[in-house]
Image: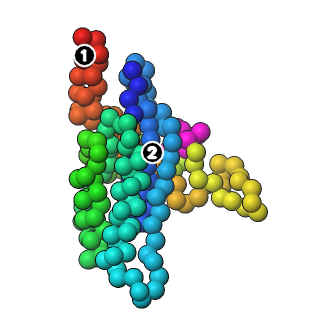
Amino acid sequence: MKLKIVGLDPSLTHTGIAIMEYDVAAAALDVSELRLIVTENQKGKQVRQNSDDLRRAREVVAGIHSACNGALFAVSEVPMGAQSARAALAFGMVIGILANLPVPLIQVSPLEVKMAAVGHRQAAKEEMIAWAVAKHPNAGWLLQDKNGARHKKGDLKADNEHLADAVAVGEAGILTDQFKQAVAMLSFAKAA
């Protein structure tokens, strides 16, 4: 039995999505697709900030809902704490997006994510990217375009940090009791 789960690294600017397949018999997780939703502020005085925020949130919602089609679960960290009012607003918007997912949400902590990925709590972004690319080399990582040609894995874009985090979130999610219990119930139901 294979189960589709979606790892999310949500934000208002760069949302990383890892669409993954969990093989119950092998207890293995494989990345089938990576998506990055990038939203930017519209420039100009004709656009109110709150209207632009709403547009950006709708883009993130549409992308996440599309990725969750057919998934059993989504897995995500839930944002907390902010250094500014603007960051607090963005975190609140992300929490609202997560609260309205079309599938159940498994919450993981930043510590669980880093431990599932690299095994220590002080993981740097570069370390998370290196781990994710090594574990899932054919996942479709973002590569630098140079003179119109895509290059090798050494030319990874910095935006892969959001995709690597989404993969790590998925890896942390399958270690949770909530996920293990759901898989046990599904396996029991299928056997009955």
58 left or right of 141 in image: left
- Quick one: label 2, few (<14), some, or many (20+) residues within 10 Å? many
- Quick one: label 1, few (<14), some, or many (20+) residues within 10 Å? few
Residue 153: image x %, image y %?
65, 48
User: Which amino acid does the dot numbered 1 rest on?
Assistant: Phe
| 135 in the magenta segment | yes
Question: At 44% from the left edge and 37% from the top edge, which residue is drawn?
Answer: 20
Residue 39: image x %, image y %?
45, 66
Q: CA distance from mark 1 to mark 2?
A: 27 Å
Please name the residue that numbered disc 2 is placed on. Answer: 18
Report the magenta residues as a range. Answer: 131-139
* Quadrant holding the N terminus: top left
Return the residue found at the far top: 192
User: Which amino acid does the dot numbered 2 rest on?
Assistant: Ala
**Which is more toward the observer, 56 or 78?**
56
108 left or right of 67 in image: left
Question: At 42% from the left edge and 66% from the top edge, which residue is drawn?
Answer: 13
Question: At 38% from the left edge and 41% from the top edge, which residue is drawn?
Answer: 69
Secondary structure category for the residue under label 1: helix
Quarter of the image for residue 106 reads top left
* Quadrant holding the C terminus: top left
Residue 106, can we see it? no
Kindly indicate whether the residue at mark 2 contacts the one at mark 1 (C-beta within 8 angstroms). Answer: no
Secondary structure category for the residue under label 2: strand
| 116 in the magenta segment | no
Residue 37: image x %, image y %?
46, 58
Q: Earlier in the sequence, mark 1 or mark 2?
A: 2
Please name the residue that numbered disc 1 is placed on. Answer: 188
**Colour scheme in the image?**
rainbow
